[in-house]
Image: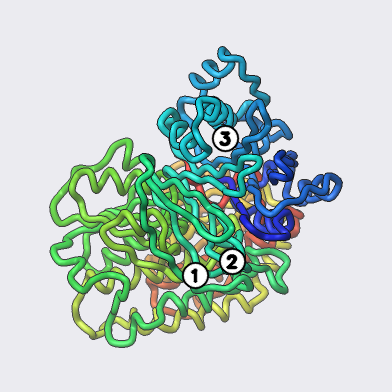
Amino acid sequence: MCGITACIGHEQTVETLLAGLDNLEYRGYDSAGIAVPTDGTLAVVKRSGEVADLVDSVRRRRPSGTFGIGHTRWSTHGAPSDENAHPHTDCTETVAVVHNGIIENYAHLRKRLRASGHELQSETDTEVIPHLVEEHRADGNGPAAALRAVIDEIEGSYAIAMVVAGDETVYAARNGSPLVIGAGEDANYLASDVPAFIEHTESVVYLEDGDVAEIGPDDYRITNWNGRRRDRPVRTVDWTAEDAEKGRHDHYMHKEIHEQPRALAQTLQGRLDDGVTLDDVPADAFDGVERVQFVACGTSYHAALYGTQLLRARGVSACTTLASEFVTAPPPATDGTLVVGVTQSGETADTLEALREAQSRGQQTLAVTNTVGSTAARECDDALFIRAGPEIGVAATKTFSSQIATLGLLAERLGTDSGADGDGFRDALAALPGAVESVVDSGAARTVARQFRDSDAYFFVGRGTGYPVALEGALKLKEISYEHAEGFAAGELKHGPLALVTGRTPVFVIDTGRNTEKLASNAEEVKSRGGPIVAVGPADSPITDLADAVLPIPETHSTLTGVLANVQLQLLAYHVAAALDRPIDKPRNLAKSVTVE
């Protein structure tokens, strides 16, 4: 949630900040702003709306300087408005702060500050921070000491970046929300995510909870809350600025759907050469594992549901729980259970809390994530990376496919130590990138989208691995088109949802090649009530005989058919949203990385 960027020591700091915010807009786009210290004062420009609106204001104001901070907001406390936009300043307007997360005790602090004579201008929780810094500076503390004193007072999760007029340093602190330093040759950078500065440097330092950083133009210093030095490794990002650009595509989502063959190839590279090799984890990491408990949210939850079935097919006991529910009502901790957090960003707050709950009970944990250096990767006993490359679109696409492929590898690793591929699953997994490419190159989804773009609602049904794909297909459509969509286990149609089926409610029936007779019976139930049927499956699926339209997929192993079906449903959602002229990469009320509970 929200995007932070900072630049220290660059002659074109304002342009660099604006470019960073543009690269981070997938994290929030309710409002945006920058603060640039100049000649002992602060130039603050902020406004509600998108980064492009901020750019217009900056062009009129023309602030300048060699260091500064910026923010693009996803609202939590206070509606989107100019006043609630970040950065926020103190009464003297010499301290400016941007913040991701939630200050849980802000109401108490706000009341205390007002009683002391402070004038607060916004409804946000963030605004208490610069005013608290102001008080501690008045007591004789320098900026870093003042920020540490504030950290002692606030409760909650946060990533904070701060500038002070007359001091060419950016101060930062992290607790529960990501921050990463970009170490450049001629300047340094800070952001909530690497795309903000990837065009300037590939050398990154991930801050950890409890870190306080002082970043100058030539160096940086990381300490803990008590001022003791902390050393953090410098890592090299293995993708380029071009990987995070749209290129010839109209939207990031369209680009990332079409990147899936390459993403899957990266996921599988070197891991299927001789049996299954999970290069990220030690060979004995899973000794003694008898069952798997997945925790995840959103699209990652659907991937985990799919992974559960892949594991069960390999004889491994597995189940999936929404991460937020795992924390609320955790299942009994049992010996031999591996708790696997599936999280694209590695920073999803609910998933992190679920993993911490599992660790507090002595359970082994594994992060399945796309982000090296993320909190989940660092805190879990082991991490298995999906290697999908950067995903900018808010609606996850290529990471879903790569998560399933990675969980398929995990299922093979846990289910057997044999190098044999008796049922052809590994061969099909190796061929998956080519199969997905044939789907993204087809035009069937565009045609079906035009046929049903004016529907009242959209239902998706499946059995087995088709069920999580039905959930994911509905999620993608509702996320970016704002149309009503629901996913069901096909057998549940007759237990309520059939009451909603009309001639304007297309039902997308996902045939994985298993339980097809029962699925056909479910389709007949819809057909007899006048509901249009869209068959999603192999060309020879019996469902096509009942269908009003078809989204065909190539033949593959039955447990991987759902991956191909999902790609068709991603394309369907994209083309429906495009036909309705929706802001596909910036769906309302949503952000890419959910770092608050």
Residue underneath mark 2: 198
Give x and y (percent) for residue 350. Answer: 40, 44
- Sooner in the amino-acid sequence: mark 2 or mark 3: 3
The residue at the far right in this view is 60
Please tell me which residue is depicted at 55% across the width and 70% down the height of the picture.
544
In the foreground, 208 or 312? 208
Give x and y (percent) for residue 331. Answer: 24, 43
Q: Identify the image quadrant of the C terminus.
A: top left
Q: Give me the C-alpha separation between circle 2 and circle 3.
A: 28 Å
Q: Residue 237 carries which label?
A: 1
Q: Give me the C-alpha separation between circle 3 and circle 1.
A: 31 Å
Give x and y (percent) for residue 517. Answer: 41, 65
Please tell me which residue is depicted at 72% across the width and 39% down the height of the picture.
41
Mark 3: amino acid: Thr
Badge 2 vs badge 1, beta-carbon distance below 8 Å: yes
Give x and y (percent) for residue 508. Answer: 56, 59
Name the mark nearer the viewer: 2 or 3: 2
Disc 1 on helix, strand or loop? loop
Mark 2: amino acid: Ile
Disc 3 on helix, strand or loop? loop
- Sooner in the amino-acid sequence: mark 2 or mark 1: 2
Badge 2 vs badge 3, beta-carbon distance below 8 Å: no
Residue underneath mark 3: 76
The residue at the far top in this view is 115
- Colouring: rainbow
In the foreground, 56 or 35? 35
